[in-house]
Image (cartoon, rainbow, N blue to C red):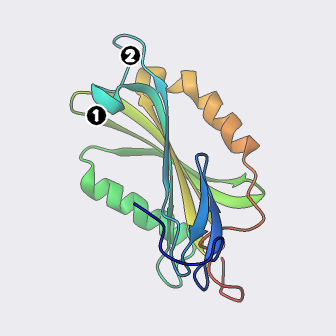
Amino acid sequence: MTAPPGPPGAAAEGARPYQMDEARFELPGGWQDQTVHIFAVPASAGEGMGDGPQGAEFSLVIHRDTPQPGEDLAAYVERQLANVKATLPGVRILREGELTVGGLAAREAELRWEAEGAGLLRQRQVYVRRQGRVLTMTGTAPERLYAKHAGAMDALLASLRFQLTLVGAPPRGTPSA
């Protein structure tokens, strides 16, 4: 595949630079970042959450979403947890709370449920609203291994620093909270 014709370095109107680990490119104007990052601690023999990619001792999934118009962070989290309850039979919300992540107000929830083939799982969801988007960080582990990895997630959250600009952010003047 070759690049479309045009002068070298020329970008489409409204395009902006986008950086990822492997590359940098011009993201067309109007495109929204919906990247999902998945990190995992490989499982020791017999210690993971099942076979295949889920066969990890601990996984951290980070994704981005756009709340509904007028929806604040508390309402967004309430809606997400209602969706979890509706789709995950037997899930228990162990606790909910507020915290600060990267200097911003955040909300969290800790859940537990029985997953077929994986046993009892425990999960921590952390939600942060920034520039009109919600960044959700979800750490999941088998219940028996959760405490082993909880400190690593705490350290990750404590080290999180937001970039000055956000690719795909609403234009200046758009409400961000």
Q: Nearer the viewer, mark 2 or mark 1?
A: 2
> Which quarter of the rendering shows the C terminus?
bottom right
Kindly give the residue lying farthest to the bottom in the view shown: 173
Q: Nearest the camera: 124 or 9?
A: 9
Element under label 2? loop
Q: Nearest the camera: 162 or 77?
A: 162
Q: Quadrant of residue 43?
A: top left
Q: Mark 2: which amino acid? A: Glu
Spatial CA distance of label 2 from label 1 is 16 Å
Q: Nearest the camera: 30 or 140?
A: 30
Q: Quadrant of residue 16?
A: bottom right
- Image location of residue 136, percent across then percent down: 53, 55
Compared with 158, 131 (above or below) is below
Q: Is residue 90 left or right of residue 42?
A: left
Q: Residues within 10 Å of mark 2 (few under 14, many from 20)?
A: some
Kindly give the residue lying farthest to the left in the view shown: 116
Residue beneath label 2, please? 47
Q: Is residue 100 left or right of residue 10?
A: right
Q: Residue at x 72, y 54 (%)?
A: 100
Residue beneath label 1, please? 114
Q: Mark 1: which amino acid? A: Glu
